[in-house]
Image (cartoon, helix red, strand yellow):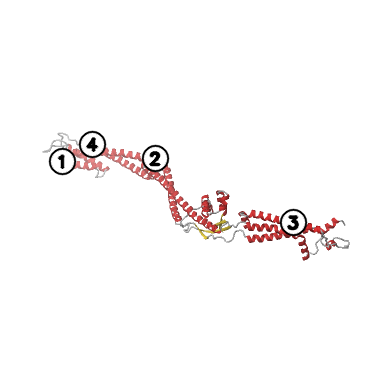
Amino acid sequence: MSVPEARHRVADSPRKGAGLEWLQAVWARHRWLALLAFAVPSTMGLSIAASMPSIYRATATVLVDRQQVPEALVAPTVTSALETRLQTISQEILSRSRLQTLIDQFRLYPELKKQVSSEEVIERMRNDIKLELKGVEVKGERQATVAFTLSYRGSVPQHVALVTNTLASFYIEENLKVRERQATGTAEFLRVQLAETKKRLDGLERGVSEFKRRHLGELPQQMEANLATLERLQMQLRLNADAQTRAQERRSFLASQVGEMAPVAGGSSESGPARLAKLQQDLAELRTRFSDKYPDVIETAAAIAALTRETAEGKPQGASQPGSSAGVSPHVSRLKAALAEAEVDLTVLKGEAIHLRQSIASYQQRVEKIPQREQEFKELGRDYETTREFYQSLLKRHDEAQVAESMEQRQKGEQFRVIEPALPPTHPVANRLRLIIMTIALSGGLAAAAVFLAEQLDASFHTVDELRQHCSLPLLVSIPLIVADEDASRHRLRFRLGAVAASIALVVVGGVSYFVAHGNEQLVWLLSKT
């Protein structure tokens, strides 16, 4: 069997004596490798734990108190989502002026301000502030925010707590200002809109009134009245025509009576009975057509009575009476007066007929124009009604906005309230003890892994039993290790050189770790999350 084959078989064969003696032998062979594999990571971890800065975090919890007045009674004018409003408030609080005031007030980042610009210091503070929302599930679909936490990190515990509580007070004050500003702005906007709408509504009202005044009698709602008036005027015109007919007949009758009974000088008395018969015949004819109260009937009856009385007294009609001038008889005078009255009545009736026809024409014109006026009035009225309804809606909203504004001013709306103020932290965010324990555990594991790997890669024989297991030939003699003085000297020299090199490597590793961890807050936050 060749030596390479024997070494291969040794590498593939199982180890014997895996007990305590084997462990002691393995430790004796690889103790310096184990120590070096343990020392390097432990030195690095301990150097980082000792040199990394102490960063503290303080947290304040702010509760969101919902509106104290039921929304069914007072509808809030601030309807933006809480999350959106918190983002808006955060932008206001994290502005450059606010943060610069806090930095100057609490003298934050004294060392950092010597190294970087003020803008970078402010950006650093923005990164050190954290807002986290806390909510509850609603119907398993979304989360309703009921509280939020504010936290700030820094190197001085007292300053961290003070800054956190100051930020919480900023959020409370800014929320009140934002809500009051929005409520006041809404009320003011509605107030301006209400005034403008009122002005426009007044103009439309004046336009409607002017339209009604200008087209009085031609409005759609006056259609029935116009038709009733038109019918009444037409009835009056028919009655007037009938009255004119009667007046014309009366005038003709009286004219004939006057012509027959005109005074004739020297007239004989024998004509009296003939006239009486004629009058009686006319009276009978009139009574067939009119009642006894008709003026012509009354006049004819009076004339018959007067002629009968004159005939009975033996005085001829139209004779001169003592003490009176010769002329017309009283009956003829009455007939002439009645004839003149009939002429006047006929003239009056004709004038009334003209006036009635003019009025009928006027009302007919009104009725004909009503459809056009109705269309014009609809257009004008539609704008007026729309504006009036919009005005009523604005008036209601304005009243509600005023109530909501009063509610916000009295701080009865949604508010923020600190339920857990920030306290000065007692421990930094990065746990050094845990880091040290993790470093020692990791270093021990790394050392064990290095020894195990070195043992697996070692293919040499260390005992007679190992050689006998892989060799069929009998072993005659075992020669122990012979170390000459020169070999011992070289071995000690190598040991010293290796120790010096290891020490230098450990110093370098410790120095690099210190340089990396010193003032490295990002490393602190990275280690605090593990």
Alpha-carbon neighbours of circle 3 within 10 Å: few (<14), some, or many (≥20)? few
Measure the C-alpha gap from mark 2 to mark 1: 67 Å
Circle 3: residue type: Gly
The residue carrying mark 4 is: 255
Looking at the image, do the residues carrying marks 4 and 1 touch, with CB atoms under 8 Å apart?
no
Measure the C-alpha gap from mark 2 to mark 3: 123 Å
The residue carrying mark 2 is: 369
Question: Quarter-wise, where is residue 493 in the image?
Answer: bottom right
Residue drawn at (68%, 61%), measured in percent from left and top? 440
Question: Quarter-wise, where is residue 379 in the image?
Answer: top left
Circle 4: residue type: Ala
Sequence-wise, the earlier of marks 4 and 3 is 4
Residue 311 is situated, as x and y percent measured from the top left of the image, at: 15, 40
Label 3 vs label 1, nearer the camera: 3
Foreground residue, 440 or 513?
A: 513
Sequence-wise, the earlier of marks 4 and 1 is 4
Residue drawn at (77%, 60%), measured in percent from left and top? 29
State whether residue 333 is above or below residue 182. above
Measure the C-alpha gap from mark 2 to mark 4: 48 Å
Question: Quarter-wise, where is residue 522 in the image?
Answer: bottom right
Foreground residue, 112 or 350?
A: 112
Alpha-carbon neighbours of circle 1 within 10 Å: few (<14), some, or many (≥20)? some
